[in-house]
Amino acid sequence: MKKLFVKTYGCQMNVYDSARMAEALAPSDYALANSASDADMILLNTCHIREKAAEKLFSDLGRLAPLKARKRRSGGTMIVAVAGCVAQAEGAEILRRAKNVDVVVGPQSYHRLPALVAAAEGGARPVETEFPAESKFDRLPTRSRAGISAFLSIQEGCDRFCSFCVVPYTRGAEFSRPARAVIDEACRLAAQGARELTLLGQNVNAYHGEAPDGGTWGLGRLIRALAEIPEVLRLRYTTSHPADMDDELVAAHRDEPKLMPFLHLPVQSGSDRVLQAMNRRHRADDYRRTIERLRTARSDLALSSDFIVGFPGESDDDFAATLALVREVGFAQAFSFKYSARPGTPAATRDDQVPEPVKAARLAALQTLLTEQQDRFNAGFAGRTIAVLFEKRGRHLGQLAGRSPWLQAVHVAAPDALLGSVAAVRVAAREPNSLTGALSEASA
Ligand code: SAH
Ligand code: SF4
Ligand code: F3S
């Protein structure tokens, strides 16, 4: 067997894709290895979302050069393949910039990877960044392993074209997998031990897949079908767009206990002027109303979001509107970023870019507020008894690590036999990034 080292950057969809690419390469005699140093192939699954993310690829390629040279001196070869969104965005340019890259493959062409690697082993430097008419999903081999918590891609690409975002260009047009294919894959993952499924898509609540009876299913309907799989104990989905939150999906939050009460719903900004310039197609009040509908459906729902500060033209008042929205909604967790101008996106060429120090100050202010909210949210759990799905062994002997319904990491002294099951835990304390506690009487 040859050794394959995979490094994944960016979003959960890349994590899912990396697993499937590794499986696609198994018939070519590649097995996953933990270290890059003596690997026969290095696969870098990249992200283009912000400049920093994209530049990471080139610094990592620089570090790989001596490893590759050493391997060659000892008579071996090391194939370096670049996949993901930088591969799609920059294509053959990567081969020019980095002489040690052998294969460039875009996100819609992963089923072609074995052929491309074979060509590279023969000395070629293939580049494949087509958007084929058919979906890659059902042309990749099925997975033979699954964790207790598993990702399942159900939708890919995006048609929304937010003016800051590269995803519509790197992942292509929105595509939903047929419901039958999703259910089949969910059943296989469950049979392999998965107990929690996180449904993935760049804009997952725009899901509109072919129904088993020929019609079309939205995400709410699909969730109801997946909840019928007895081994699946928990369902989540990410990432969603506020304007695609339809009534059926809101109803799923009300009616389906397996759907966890935690939702990542990016709002980006609290200013209508900025939201419009971002081409988000909803106002701040629409977001507030959507949150209200969701909380009416499921009162214990906790929210997460993404924010961009320093979008071109963002004024102090616009930023104040973002802080106001955050204070009103209250988030359990959130990600926030300084706007990064991305080549080929409409916002990048605007002449009212916000100066770097202003972006930095706004980010710091927003993160202070978001961290306060997160701390308050977690502090509220002391003394409460919550349901934890145990996913893996903890750092200390005799300890298991799991997740609460609200995605908090929880560490508890518990026997291995509880891996893969949900048990009641009484929360004692809060560490910086997790909760600790003890199994409550009933489950101990
Ligand atoms: N599909 C998701 C988000 C995909 S990208 C959605 O619609 O919300 C993840 C996050 O990265 C975005 O929510 C946004 O907050 C951030 N992001 C995307 N492009 C960015 C850019 N050019 N600069 C800074 N942050 C960006
Ligand atoms: Fe990007 Fe999300 Fe907007 Fe699509 S909806 S363009 S993925 S931010
Ligand atoms: Fe990054 Fe592509 Fe995901 S740009 S965030 S890896 S869709």
Image: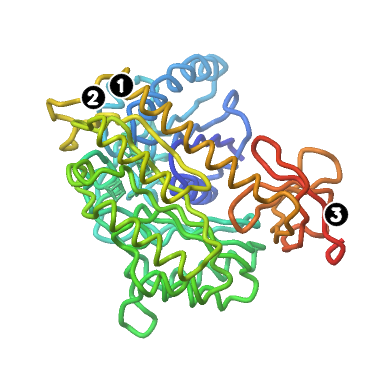
| Above or below, comparing residue 148 to residue 257 in the picture | above
Relative image position of residue 146 (x, y in whole percent): 61, 57
Q: From the top left corner, tell me how far across and down residue 343 is, in percent.
A: 21, 31
Q: Nearer the viewer, residue 163 or 34?
A: 163
Q: Which mark is residue 415?
A: 3
Q: Is residue 194 left or right of residue 349?
A: right
Between marks 2 and 3 in the image, the one whose residue lies nearer the viewer: 2
Marks 2 and 3, how far apart at CA: 53 Å
Residue located 53% across and 74% down the image: 256
- Identify residue type, mark 2: Val
Between the C-alphas of marks 2 and 1, the distance is 7 Å
**In terms of sequence position, does the residue under pointer 2 or pointer 3 come before the other?**
2
Image height of 153 relative to 28, above or below: below
* Mark 1 nearby-residue class (10 Å; few <14, some 14–19, many ≥20): some
Label 2 Cα crowd, 10 Å radius (few <14 / some 14-19 / many 20+): some
Front residue of this view, candidates 113 and 279: 279
* Image quadrant where one finds the N terminus: top right
Q: Residue at x 67, y 42 (%)?
A: 434
Residue at 47% in and 42% down: 334
* Picture quadrant where residue 53 is located: top left
Q: CA distance from mark 3 to mark 1?
A: 51 Å
Residue at which label 1 appears? 358
State the mark number for residue 354: 2
